[in-house]
Amino acid sequence: MKRFQYFIESQAFGVCTMLGEKLGIATSSIRFSFIYVSFLTMGSPVIVYLMLAFWLNVQKSLRRERSTVWDL
């Protein structure tokens, strides 16, 4: 089950996982909160989620392209 969960999180954006790690909160509680708030506000947190997902992808691509002094 853990392998399946890791596969899904690695293929998805990983926004809730990143927030959970940064804030020290369980990712399941962040996901449930996001779902509840999305239903209460008619889906407006989806825009915030997509912006965070875009930002994470930008950060990942910048980390991959950054070279060190030793890469000559």
Image (cartoon, helix red, strand yellow):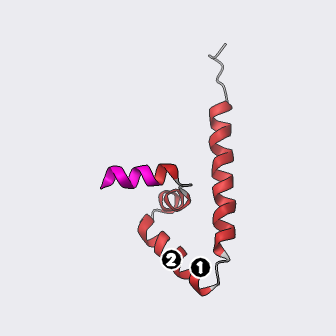
Q: Is residue 66 above or below residue 43?
A: above
Q: Earlier in the sequence, mark 1 or mark 2?
A: 2
Q: Which amino acid type is marked by label 2? A: Ser
Q: Which residues are magenta?
A: 1-8
Residue 38, numbered circle: 1
Q: Residue at x 65, y 83 (%)?
A: 42
Give the main secondary structure, helix, strand or loop, of the magenta stretch: helix
Secondary element under disc 1, as helix, strand or loop, is helix
Q: Residue at x 69, y 61 (%)?
A: 51
Residue 65 at x, y percent in the picture: 67, 31
Q: Residue at x 42, y 49 (%)?
A: 7
Secondary element under disc 2, as helix, strand or loop, is helix
Toward the bottom, the furthest residue is 40
Q: Name the quadrant of the C terminus.
A: top right
- Counting labels gives 2
Toward the top, the furthest residue is 72
Please name the residue that numbered disc 2 is placed on. Answer: 33
Q: Which amino acid type is marked by label 1? A: Ser
